[in-house]
Image (cartoon, helix red, strand yellow):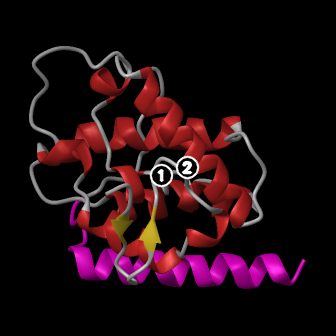
Amino acid sequence: MDWIQTYTGRRFCPLDPVAGDFDVRDIAHSLSMLCRFNGHCLRFYSVAEHSVRVSRLLDGELRLWGLLHDAGEAYLTDLPRPVKGQMPEFREMEDRILELAMRSFGLPWPMPAAVKLADDRLLATEARDLMGPPPADWGLTAAPLDERITDPLGPDAAEQLFLKTYDIYTVLRSQR
């Protein structure tokens, strides 16, 4: 079997993705069910909520890029950074899926530097607010946000927020 079934019932081939196979509903649902930090945070905190928060740190067209920056994880799952760094083939597969997803949503490739910076700032914020005391320095270079994350959303609310945010950004985009 070389495919997975998505939430909306699509057949998705991770090793040979097709642009028409991407559906924002699949991305929102899957990311809302994935917990950040491989589930090691103090409370459930979804990749979908993380993505919405990243998008809010950006302006203009970059907001949609920020919202969808982890779309590849909806089809491959996420791996902790230290593991992913040791698996170049996985990283290449993830990048291939992400590039195709971005192009299918009409966004440029590669990931803009501002999106990466927003993602890193949110990582520092999440580490501060959602993890226990660190056993060692994480080595993060970005400063956390002043705003704190105090009450993460559950999966259903995170999925709905992701979809609502997507709708807002795509309507604004069409008005340009």
**Residue 59 in view here:** no
Magenta stretch contains residue 154: yes
If you read the primary sequence from the N terminus, does the residue marked by circle 1 or circle 2 appear first? Answer: 1
Q: CB atoms at circles 1 and 2 under 8 Å apart?
A: yes
Q: Amino acid at mark 1?
A: Gly
**What residue appears at the point 78 percent right and 51 percent down from the top-left corner?**
108
Q: Is residue 74 left or right of residue 108?
A: left
Which of these two is toward me, 175 or 85? Answer: 85
Q: Position of residue 8 (x, y in %)?
A: 40, 84
Q: Amino acid at mark 2?
A: Ile
Magenta stretch contains residue 145: no
142 up-or-down from 24: above or below: above
Question: Please, which residue is most extreme toward the front here?
Answer: 1
Q: Secondary structure at mark 1?
A: loop
**What residue appears at the point 46 percent right and 20 percent down from the top-left corner?**
141
Classify 10 Å Cα crowding around label 2: few (below 14), some (14-19), many (20 and above). many
Quadrant of the rendered structure where residue 27 is? bottom left
Q: Main secondary structure of the magenta part?
A: helix
- For marks 1 and 2, give the CA distance: 6 Å
Q: Secondary structure at mark 2?
A: helix
Q: Quadrant of the C terminus?
A: bottom right
Which residue has dot 2 on it? 97
Question: Which residues fall within the magenta stretch?
Answer: 150-176
23 up-or-down from 128: above or below: below
151 up-or-down from 133: above or below: below
Which of these two is toward me, 142 or 106? Answer: 106
On residue 72, the disc is 1
